[in-house]
Structures are given as structure tokens and as C-alpha cells.
């Protein structure tokens, strides 16, 4: 079974009893403008549901390794769109020597006092390049310390991000979700559509997370994608170095 944008659009329309264009008509919009607004509102409901679902580190979101080349003496490297939420960064050909993700303030502290990591480890923080006002967010990049003395390759593991759906998205676009969360995503789309209209979204989402669909999806996900790394226990992204066992392979459960 595959879940398409067309199917989710239909579920949102069913949840609302039709196209959400009444408010646009009341605002004095033309029929064409109202239809366009309705399509946008439907897409917003789908994106809200998808991003809420993807706020959890589901196993099906894991992507293959992507290699990124860092130039010699570079203090940052831009990330390609193929990299989602970062799980781990390793230096090519160097055993047990990763790039530790830390917060921006700590990276600046290390740069200021010239701190060098032990065992050849490097530090990085995820940020974005400057963008022109009105142009949206700049490209994602990794700010690095210390700089590599020679050109090196970084092997980056990440999780897929939710693809932004628009009114113009092809209805036959197949969404990147596992079959065991398709029903859950469908319900979430209906919840977002009704919850935003009735101003009860938070209550409805709590009910979904406490219900059998969410719990069953977690169980199946754990069985089909066993976890054994730092993509669980809230350690994805920025975290203190002391929050892991030696080798950074498993989360340290101690405070």
C-alpha cells in the first residue's frame, strides 16, 4: 500500500465536510481566489500532520550515508539537500574519530581559546548561511573546529525530513512513510484539519499519542528497525560530550 497526496487531500476534505473556502468567500475573495486558498489550507493541514509525525525518530526515516568533502583549512561546509536530520558524523578512514555536534556557544568558546579535542575528534554545530531578506532560510551548513589541515571526507548519517506539500504538488506523489504509519498519518491529517478549525488541536493530538494507533506504530517500528544508537533518548543533534558512553555508540542513561 502506498499513500499519495491525493488520498490525504481527500481525507482533509472529508474531515471538513468539503473545501475549506467559506472564510475566503466571506473575506470578499473571488471564486478562483477562494479555491486557491482552500487548496493552500488543505496543504497546510497535510504538512502539519506530516511534520508532527516526523517529530519522532521513526526507523523508516533513516537514510543511507552521504559523503561530504571538507576543503583544507575550511571552517565550515554546506550540506546537500539529501541530508536530513543528522544522526552521526564520522571522518572517512579514521577509526573511532567522529565529529561531535555541540551548541554554537560552546563551538565559539573552543574557537576563542583554541581548544583541541582529544583523540583527533572534531567539533561542529549546525547552522545556516546568511540569506537576503525575504528570500527565506539560507543553506544549511556545519561550522567546524578545528579546521582540517588537509581535505577530508565526512560520512554523515541522517533521517529523512518531511517533504513540504503545496497546492501545486502532484496528487500522485507517494509520501515517504512506512505502511504501518499510513493509517496514523491519515488520522493526523483529519485531526489537523478539524483541530485548527475548532481550536482543539492540542487536545486532539494528545489523544492520538495516547491511543492505540500511535503505540502500535511505535511497536512495529521498533521491531522492524531495531534501535542501537544515539537517534533515540533525545540525543539527536546537539548534546554534551558527557552524555554518551566511550566511543559514542550508546546513550549514557546516567544524568
Image: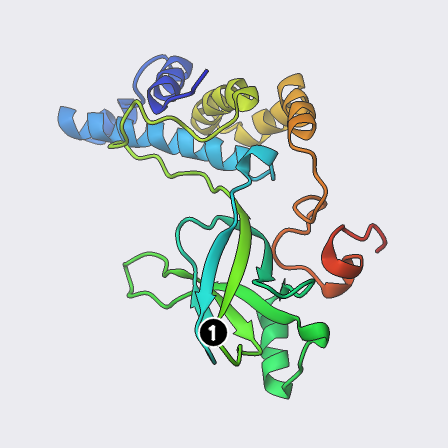
Residue that protrudes farthest toward the bottom in the picture = 113
Residue that protrudes farthest toward the right in the picture = 254
The percent coordinates of residue 35 (x first, y second) are 21, 25
Instruction: Tally the numbered discs.
Output: 1
- Which of the 4 image quarters holds residue 247? bottom right
- Which of the 4 image quarters holds residue 113? bottom right
Badge 1 crowding class, 10 Å Cα cut-off, few under 14, some 14 to 19, many 20 or more, is: few
- Residue at the (57%, 69%) spot, across then down: 104
Q: Does residue 239 lie above or below 185 as drawn?
A: below
Tell me if residue 102 can be seen: no
Q: Does residue 196 lie above or below 179 as drawn?
A: below
As helix, strand or loop, the secondary structure at mark 1 comes to: loop
The residue nearer to you, when weighing 88 against 7, is 88
- Residue at the (59%, 64%) spot, across then down: 93
The percent coordinates of residue 37 (x first, y second) are 25, 31
- Residue at the (53%, 27%) spot, across then down: 200
Q: Classify residue 79 as left or right of residue 215.
A: left
Q: Classify residue 235 as left or right of residue 48.
A: right
Q: Does residue 103 lie above or below 217 as drawn?
A: below
Q: Classify residue 195 as left or right of residue 165.
A: right
Say which residue label 1 marks: 151
The residue nearer to you, when weighing 179 against 128, is 179
Residue that protrudes farthest toward the front in the picture = 93
Q: Classify residue 160 as left or right of residue 242.
A: left
Quadrant in which the C terminus is drawn: bottom right
The percent coordinates of residue 119 (x first, y second) are 72, 73
The percent coordinates of residue 39 (x first, y second) are 27, 27
Q: Does residue 73 lie above or below 208 as drawn?
A: below
Colour mapping = rainbow
Tell me if residue 72 can be seen: yes
- Residue at the (54%, 55%) spot, across then down: 156
Amino acid at each position: 500500500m502506498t499513500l499519495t497526496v491525493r488520498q490525504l487531500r481527500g481525507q482533509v476534505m472529508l474531515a471538513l465536510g468539503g473545501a475549506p473556502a467559506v472564510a475566503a468567500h466571506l473575506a470578499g475573495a473571488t471564486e478562483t481566489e477562494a479555491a486557491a486558498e482552500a487548496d493552500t489550507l488543505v496543504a497546510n493541514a497535510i504538512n502539519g500532520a506530516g511534520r508532527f509525525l516526523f517529530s519522532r525518530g521513526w526507523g523508516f526515516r533513516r537514510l543511507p550515508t552521504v559523503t561530504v568533502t571538507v576543503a583544507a583549512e575550511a571552517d565550515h561546509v554546506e550540506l546537500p539537500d539529501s541530508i536530513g536530520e543528522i544522526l552521526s558524523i564520522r571522518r572517512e578512514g579514521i577509526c573511532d574519530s567522529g565529529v561531535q555536534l555541540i551548541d554554537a556557544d560552546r563551538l565559539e568558546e573552543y574557537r576563542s581559546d583554541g581548544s583541541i579535542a582529544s583523540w583527533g575528534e572534531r567539533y561542529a554545530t549546525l547552522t545556516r548561511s546568511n540569506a537576503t531578506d525575504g528570500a527565506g532560510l539560507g543553506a544549511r551548513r556545519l561550522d567546524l573546529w578545528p579546521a582540517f589541515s588537509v581535505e577530508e571526507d565526512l560520512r554523515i548519517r541522517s533521517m529523512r525530513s518531511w517533504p513540504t506539500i503545496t497546492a501545486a504538488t502532484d496528487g500522485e506523489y507517494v509520501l515517504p512513510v512506512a505502511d504501518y504509519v499510513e493509517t496514523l498519518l491519515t488520522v493526523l491529517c483529519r485531526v489537523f484539519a478539524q483541530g485548527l478549525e475548532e481550536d482543539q488541536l492540542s487536545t486532539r493530538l494528545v489523544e492520538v499519542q495516547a491511543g492505540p494507533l500511535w503505540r502500535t506504530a511505535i511497536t512495529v517500528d521498533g521491531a522492524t528497525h531495531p534501535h542501537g544508537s544515539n537517534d533515540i533518548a533525545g540525543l539527536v543533534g546537539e548534546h554534551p560530550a558527557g552524555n554518551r558512553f566511550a566511543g559514542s555508540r550508546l546513550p549514557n542513561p546516567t544524568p
